[in-house]
Image (spheres, rainbow, N blue to C red):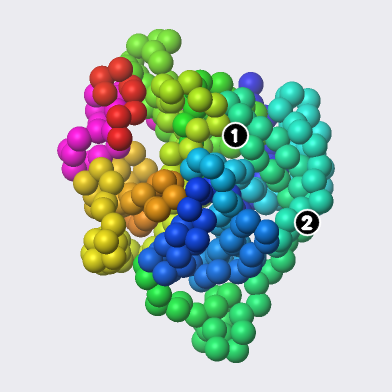
Amino acid sequence: MYKNPHFFSHLAHVELISPKLEESANFFKNIIGLEESGRSENSVYFRAWGEHYHHSLKITEGTEPGLGHIGWRADSPAALEEAAAHIEKLGQGIGWIEGDLGHGRAYQFTSPDGHLEEIFWDVELYEAPDQLQSKWKNRPQKNPGRGISPRRIDHITLFSNDVTKDREFYQNIGFRYNEGIFLNANEPGSPEIGAWLSVTNLSHDIAFLKNHSGKPGGFNHVCYAVESREEVLLAADHILESGYELAMGGPTRHALAEGFFFYVDEPGGNRFELYAGAHLVFAPDFGPYRWSLSENPNDAWGREMPWDASGKVIK
């Protein structure tokens, strides 16, 4: 069914909408420790110190929190053109735009549930000023040690009104389906509650959770990565000392994908995850693994799940 085309190289950036632009910008710059890389009208752009592009996060002012769009880098200039033609045939294409700060022309499309996305090739590579030059030859800059100071963006998790439909669309555009959560994984036709997919060796570049609100294009969280569990623990202390609360009682560890993590809600109402220690996928025939909701795949240490028995997200 899926020919596994190679259109996408990796997740490049995420745009979030915030009704409190300056408060959100302060949070991501001074509490999380991202580098502000630009401003344009009602948007602020950020990158982590280990990233080579202009930005991995764009915060845009709006009336309600949520997802603006997702940006993917193509695997090559030819892959960009092929992706646009393929997505157009699938009926999810919107069309070409000139680009944005940090990248060139992009092809926009939507997921079946309405998440706005784009794929592009041309990018602006970051060049550090003298005071941020690193002794490590391939680092784009030194670690500034501000806030949590994550190294890179890791993944995005979205809400979907039809997880199966979104998951199948992503498989059709070249994503590998690694793991899924079902009400009962051993029962044929059991409702699909979650799906974890990737185009890289990460456990997932994108994930979908069942949305019961009925609102299309829902957003759950964006995740950035640090190098170790110890950094996650120190970051949790920093979040609390900065006057914020950890969501869902973290830090803890996912049973699915193995990441050690916590969540925190930024001032604009969007959820941020910090992550370390997740497994990497190298085997071409990995999965997909199917887990039942009752197995609590969200938390290896047995803490309360974010879903009720019907699969409804409650946290």
Range drawn in magenta: 287-307
Frontmost residue, 216 versus 201: 216
Query: Residue 301's x, y, as percent?
Result: 18, 43
Left or right, 128 with reference to 254: right
Residue 167 placement, left or right of 77: left
Residue in the image at 48% along x and 21% along y: 214
Pick whichever of labels 1 and 2 is earlier in the sequence.
2
Circle on res. 104: 2
> Which residue is pictured at 51% across the width and 49% down the height?
18
Q: The residue under label 2 is which amino acid type?
A: Gly
Q: Which residue is mark 1?
A: 115
- Left/right of residue 81 with respect to residue 228 in the rendered view: right
Estimate the spatial distance between the alpha carbons at disc 1 and disc 2, rounded to whole Å: 21 Å
Q: Is residue 18 magenta?
A: no
Label 2 secondary element: loop
Q: Amino acid at mark 1?
A: His
Residue 115 figure quarter: top right
In this rendering, position of residue 278 left or right of residue 113: left
Predominant SS along the magenta part: loop
Residue at 71% across / 61% down in the picture?
Answer: 101
Instruction: Measuring from the top left, give residue 204's x and y in whole percent.
Output: 47, 43
Is residue 173 positioned above or below 192 on the image?
below
Is residue 287 visible in the rendered image? The answer is: no
Q: How many marks?
A: 2
